[in-house]
Amino acid sequence: MKKRLISFLVATVAAVSLVVPSAIAADLTDVGFLDQAQLASLPVFQRAQGQLAQYQSQLRSQYDGQYRAAKTDADKQRVAMAYQQAMSDKQRELIGPLYARAQMAIANVADSKHLSIVVDKRIVVYGGQDITKDVISLVTSSKAITPPATAAPSSEIGFVDQTALETAQKVKDAADQLAKYQADQQKVYGEKLKGVKGDVEKQQIIADYNKAMQDKRNQLLTPLIDQTKSATQTIAKSKNLLLVIDRADVVYGGTDITQDVQNALGK
């Protein structure tokens, strides 16, 4: 429930954009895009993913036995954490170097084309420079890749790290309130369902429960959504940004306004 609340909230932020129509043609020429799915499908990445999957299968067999043998919740938690740590270490070993090489390749290509930001291809409908082939060519070459001498130039496209907004106290409070309300309502409507035999009456009770939950979501979320939109727009205007997108869609560069939005929402 908490994840759905936060996802609903931050998805609204992702939809916030500030665009100056007369400036788009001139100002967005420094925007590139990358087909990350195509990059991930390269044999070198596929082999690493296959090795990781094989390791996970072996590790799961090992830890499943330990988990079943655990006698206390604390022991089960310890086993689960050990499993997650082992997987994280292996992923860092297998994928880490490939990811680092890809990031340096992206930075080099972006630098050579004077791009201030590179975004994921899936959010691009029109415009921008496709750097997918250049990045793949550099990644798959035998050439050593080093970071470019200069950092990404200032960009008029900003981004917000949606997951970071979860730390805002107002978001946490709303999530907690909604979770408590849901638990209470499940008890209330659970009691109403007891002894009810007719399908029509059951469906009505379920519909009433769903409506009560939706009304509560709207009550808790609407103020947060409005405040987040307002904060994002105000900050974007103050920084002369043309557009604000989700951090998950940014591959390289961009102007990070996450901290500013967090401050506006209150920690």
Image (tube, helix red, strand yellow):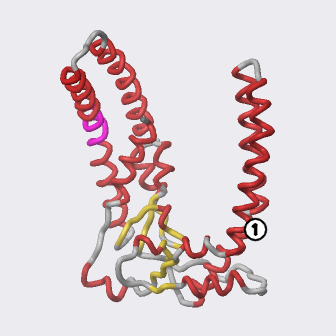
Q: State whether residue 99 appears in this view.
A: no
Measured from the top left, where is residue 158 in percent x and y?
A: 43, 68
Name which residue lies at 27% across and 77% down.
20
Q: Inspect the magenta stretch and tell me whether residue 219 lies in it.
A: yes
The quarter of the displayed image where residue 184 is located = top left
- Vertical relation: 263 (above or below) 177: below
Q: Which residue is drawn at 59% across and 90% down?
A: 112
* 135 relative position to 17: left or right: right
Q: Nearer the viewer, residue 182 or 64?
A: 64
Disc 1 packing (10 Å; few <14; some 14–19; many ≥20): few
Residue placed at 38% from the left, 66% from the top?
244
Of 258 and 217, the residue lying toward us:
217
Percent x, y of residue 119: 48, 73
Q: Which quadrant: the N terminus?
A: top left
Residue 148 belongs to the span the image colors magenta = no
- Compared with 191, 169 (above or below) is below
Q: Where does label 1 land, which residue?
A: 97
Q: Is mark 1 on a helix, strand or loop?
A: helix
Q: Amino acid under label 1? A: Pro
* In the rendered image, the vertical position of residue 87 relative to residue 247, given as above or below: above
On the rendered structure, is 23 left or right of 251? left
Q: Which residues are the magenta region?
A: 216-223
Please count the marks in the image: 1
